[in-house]
Image (cartoon, rainbow, N blue to C red):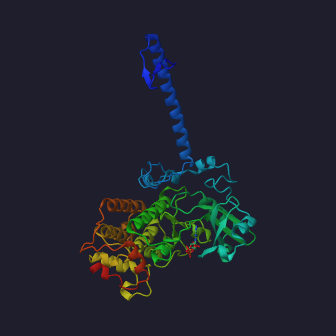
């Protein structure tokens, strides 16, 4: 049977081609060309739609692997785009893009999930069940932290300011700071959604990150221990977040309080840095970034140059990041009060071990030891040593740190992990290692190194 498409259905039901007349063939070629053009047009339209949606953030990338190179919105370092090329493009949405995306809020802020940047007292009370103790998830310098559910079902963290925290800060300043901070959007920074002000009550509403802090993971009070690759991923995430604050955000800023308890961990064991801009929100030095009248930060992480000169630079964050790297590799707190004197300041002890060629002694006993992991650990400690340099000029930029860490991570991936125990590098059973070694003190665990 001949049908309109110049095919014949055979008795067996197969499609057979039959020769066409020359005019038929011409018409066919023309219509084919037209339909190809039509297809290209439709495809181009589709690509446009996807691209537009992706740019304004509708399409959130699911993978955190290398995404396409993205153009920073305020690249004041000229041409330095390599770091953000590792991050998702949603990291770099400009505020104008956000505004056009969100016909949502009063000031066009947020990712579209939250409808406004100012919350009513009633809404906050409802979200936290009247600041109920059962919703309390933590406490810090700013005040108590509550978990809350907004009207639209979104889970948030709500930080209720201690009264003394806002006495020094006018309402207008507080609101301006919030507005500035709420525009900062990066995958590895805890998002600030908005604020609530009511009489003498102030609170800020932030992204909820529910898998504990890095410190809790290192202490073993949260999760089941972090492998070396996971620790490297976390270090890279923190590196990207701080690079973004220093370099790419509309209002470049110094974090001032990088520490393991300010690094929140996601379910997928990736990191989000919290509390950026908090020094300003707490009424300390609002607006000031480089010359400080008050030293702000946490003991053990503070740049000695900042302590000496009161001059704050991006390199003060680099120093604190160096402390964090040592913490990640050793598992120890920056200051270990219960350790013998020579081990009390963890960075001094670990860097000394590195200098003496004994870095492995400083390695967190919970970590599996094999050539790849010990090599990665040594490289990270070498980077930490640079970050901790006395002279600020000698410290690398955060961007450089993230690049170095990325290479260490890549090398680790490429090095095969031995599947059997070797005399030089005993491989400990990860699970057993994790659960049996928590809570050890002093030099315990070192027997595994010489085993
Ligand atoms: N966005 C969040 N999502 C989930 N939990 C959070 C969030 N922010 C804070 N928390 C919890 O609340 C605790 C206190 O946090 P907060 O940032 O107020 O203090 P801190 O950073 O630990 O200390 P300080 O403010 O003195 O530097 C954290 O340790 C964490 O357990």
Any part of residue 306 in sight: yes
Viewer-side residue, 352 vs 65: 65
Residue occupying the point 65% across, 73% down: 135
Query: Taking 56 as reference, is 426 above or below it?
Result: below
Number of residue marks: 0
Residue occupying the point 48% across, 15% down: 27
Query: Taking 158 as reference, is 47 above or below it?
Result: above
Residue occupying the point 44% across, 50% down: 67
User: In terms of image quadrants, where is residue 83?
Assistant: bottom left
Residue occupying the point 27% across, 80% down: 450
Q: Quadrant of ligand 1?
A: bottom right
Any part of residue 161 in sight: no
Viewer-side residue, 396 vs 19: 19
User: In terms of image quadrants, where is residue 337?
Assistant: bottom left
Q: In which quarter of the image is the C terminus?
A: bottom left
Residue 9, percent from left and from top: 47, 22
Residue 123, percent from left and from top: 73, 64
Viewer-side residue, 367 vs 26: 26
Query: Taking 241 as reference, is 15 above or below it?
Result: above
Q: Which residue lies furthest to the front in this view?
A: 11
Residue 384, percent from left and from top: 37, 70
Image check: 437 left or right of 210? left
User: In terms of image quadrants, where is residue 288?
Assistant: bottom right
Residue 194, percent from left and from top: 65, 62
């Amino acid at each position: 049977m001949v049908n309109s498409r110049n095919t014949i259905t055979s008795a067996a039901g197969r499609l057979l081609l039959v020769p066409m007349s020359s005019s038929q063939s011409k018409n066919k070629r023309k219509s084919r060309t037209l339909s190809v053009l039509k297809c290209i047009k439709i495809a181009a339209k589709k690509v446009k739609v996807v691209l537009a949606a992706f740019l304004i953030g509708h399409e959130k990338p699911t993978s955190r692997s290398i995404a396409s190179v993205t153009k920073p919105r305020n690249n004041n370092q000229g041409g330095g785009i390599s770091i953000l090329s590792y991050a998702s493009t949603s990291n770099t949405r400009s505020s104008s893009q956000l505004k056009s995306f969100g016909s949502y809020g009063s000031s066009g802020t947020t990712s579209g999930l939250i409808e406004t940047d100012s919350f009513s007292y009633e809404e906050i009370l409802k979200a936290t069940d009247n600041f109920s103790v059962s919703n309390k998830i933590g406490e810090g310098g700013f005040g108590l932290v509550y978990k809350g559910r907004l009207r639209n079902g979104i889970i948030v963290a709500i930080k209720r300011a201690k009264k003394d925290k806002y006495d020094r800060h006018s309402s207008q300043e507080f609101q301006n700071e919030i507005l500035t901070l709420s525009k900062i959007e990066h995958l590895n920074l805890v998002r600030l959604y908005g604020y609530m002000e009511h009489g003498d009550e102030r609170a800020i509403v932030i992204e909820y990150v529910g898998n504990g802090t890095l410190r809790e993971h290192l202490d073993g009070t949260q999760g089941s221990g972090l492998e070396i690759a996971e620790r490297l991923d976390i270090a890279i995430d923190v590196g990207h977040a701080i690079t973004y604050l220093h370099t790419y955000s509309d209002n470049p800023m110094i974090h001032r309080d990088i520490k393991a308890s300010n690094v929140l961990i996601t379910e997928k064991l990736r990191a989000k840095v919290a509390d950026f801009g908090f020094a300003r929100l707490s009424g300390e030095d609002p607006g000031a970034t480089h010359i400080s009248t008050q030293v702000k930060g946490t003991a053990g992480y503070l740049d000695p140059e900042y302590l000496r000169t009161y001059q704050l630079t991006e390199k003060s964050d680099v120093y604190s990041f160096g402390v964090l790297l040592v913490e990640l590799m050793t598992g120890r707190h920056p200051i270990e009060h219960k350790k013998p004197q020579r081990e009390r300041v963890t960075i001094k002890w670990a860097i000394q071990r590195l200098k003496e060629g004994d870095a492995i002694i400083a390695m967190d006993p919970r970590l599996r030891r094999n050539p790849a992991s010990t090599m990665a650990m040594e490289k990270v400690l070498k980077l930490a040593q640079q970050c901790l340099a006395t002279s600020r000029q000698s410290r690398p930029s955060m961007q450089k740190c993230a690049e170095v860490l990325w290479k260490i991570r890549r090398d680790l991936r490429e090095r095969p992990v031995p599947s059997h125990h070797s005399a030089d590098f005993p491989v400990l059973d990860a699970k057993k290692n994790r659960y049996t070694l928590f809570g050890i003190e002093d030099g315990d665990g070192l027997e595994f190194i010489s085993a």
